[in-house]
């Protein structure tokens, strides 16, 4: 069976990456691409790397144009998806790459986003531990999926095995991330101009203000069945001059009595059979260059007994595994297709 697909926000970074992956997917037909201000223009004018899709023209983003497809991807700014999802009740499968359907807590939404709160959907991170099982079990036959925030899924995948196994204390998590500016989207922002980011590193959303914090707390609480209030995290992202990628360094105190073998064993059990989340051999740590264009999250783990903390360093491509790859992987699961269809573990080098 071939599934018809519509992609909104197709002129942006996330929409473009979804299209790049779907262009190589043998089970889908990209039938419709939509945008707002760029509607009426050829897709290839805005995504010139997508040569196989040069025949497509951007249409207006309306519920009527998005309806009538087997799968609809929404790659819209936060707070804009809900107006369309409310009107797509008949669509067999809708996947939102924005934040509108990620959070289960309305109070968290109000505090970090504001505006209308929409019902939470199945969270599109298949490898996450959720109360002793993997999130992919909740994605099977799902009809509504919320793709993750790239920073949030990176930190959550980094620490969920330790939280679930009880070998780290989640009440004192510290995470610092080097991130590429493509995670902020394609809209013109003066502080993201090349002249502003080249040769420098710029922290942002400091002091507990980043919107991905409640998403991380929600995911880690689900890993242990705990109250999100018990998950405390200091989260500091830093823009660095690479177009795409995240290198997340996350640390947490070692739980009392946990041995080095128990700690590393928690991550090995969680990801030993996974294709797209891989724990590197002891003493090895990833680079963002290793995951460029790939749907992989590579992580290295160290037990720092002097500081009594576990340190996990994880690299992902924020546009692939962080967003579009997670969305396509989740689509594959929901449709009963091979999970790795149109996705690769191989990056691009040099």
Image: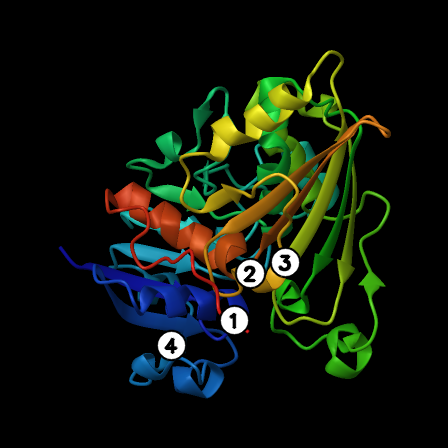
Residue at horizontal 72 percent and vertical 46 percent from the top: 249
**Separation of disc 2 and disc 1 at Cα?**
8 Å
Q: Earlier in the sequence, mark 2 or mark 1?
A: 2
- Judge whether 273 appears above or below 330 on screen: above
Q: Earlier in the sequence, mark 4 or mark 1?
A: 4
Q: Earlier in the sequence, mark 3 or mark 1?
A: 3
Residue at horizontal 86 percent and vertical 30 percent from the top: 307
**Where does the C terminus fall, quadrant-wise?**
bottom right
- Are discs 4 and 3 less than 8 Å apart at CB? no
* Along the line of sight, the residue nearer the viewer: 167 or 211: 167
* Along the line of sight, the residue nearer the viewer: 234 or 283: 283
The part of the image, by quadrant, that contains residue 245 is: bottom right
Residue on which disc 3 sits: 287
- Are discs 2 and 1 less than 8 Å apart at CB? yes
Residue on which disc 4 sits: 59
Residue 182 horizontal/vertical position (percent): 62, 68
The part of the image, by quadrant, that contains residue 162 is: top right
**Separation of disc 2 and disc 4 at Cα?**
36 Å
Residue 76 horizontal/vertical position (percent): 52, 62
Residue 224 horizontal/vertical position (percent): 59, 20
Q: In the shown orientation, is residue 46 left or right of residue 93? A: right
* Along the line of sight, the residue nearer the viewer: 322 or 344: 344
């Amino acid at each position: 069976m071939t599934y018809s697909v519509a992609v909104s926000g197709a002129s942006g970074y996330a929409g473009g990456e979804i299209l790049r992956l779907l262009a190589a997917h043998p089970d889908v037909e990209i039938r419709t691409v939509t945008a707002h201000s760029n509607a009426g223009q050829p897709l290839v004018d805005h995504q010139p790397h997508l040569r196989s899709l040069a025949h497509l023209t951007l249409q207006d983003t309306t519920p009527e144009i998005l309806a009538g497809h087997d799968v609809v991807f929404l790659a819209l700014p936060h707070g804009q998806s809900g107006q369309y999802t409310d009107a797509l009740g008949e669509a067999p499968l809708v996947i939102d790459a924005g934040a509108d359907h990620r959070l289960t807590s309305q109070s968290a939404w109000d505090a970090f986003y504001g505006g209308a709160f929409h019902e939470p959907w199945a969270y599109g991170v298949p490898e996450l531990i959720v109360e002793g099982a993997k999130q992919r079990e909740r994605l099977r036959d799902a009809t509504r999926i919320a793709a993750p925030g790239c920073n949030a899924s990176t930190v959550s995948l980094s620490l969920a095995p330790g939280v679930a196994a009880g070998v780290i204390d989640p009440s004192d998590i510290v995470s610092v991330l080097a991130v590429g500016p493509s995670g902020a989207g394609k809209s013109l922002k003066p502080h993201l101009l090349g002249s502003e980011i080249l040769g420098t590193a710029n922290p942002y959303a400091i002091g507990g203000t980043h919107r991905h914090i409640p998403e991380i707390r929600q995911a880690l609480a689900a890993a242990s069945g705990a109250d999100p209030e018990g998950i405390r995290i200091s989260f500091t992202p830093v823009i660095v001059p690479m177009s795409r990628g995240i290198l997340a360094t996350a640390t947490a105190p070692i739980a009392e009595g946990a041995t080095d073998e128990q700690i590393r064993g928690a991550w090995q059990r969680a990801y030993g059979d996974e294709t797209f989340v891989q724990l590197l051999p002891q003493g090895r740590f990833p680079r963002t260059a290793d995951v460029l264009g790939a749907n992989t999250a590579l992580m290295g783990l160290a037990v720092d007994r002097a500081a009594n903390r576990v340190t996990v360093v994880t690299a992902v491509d924020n546009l692939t595994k962080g967003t579009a790859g997670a969305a396509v992987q989740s689509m594959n699961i929901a449709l009963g297709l091979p999970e790795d269809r149109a996705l690769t573990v191989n990056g691009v080098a040099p």
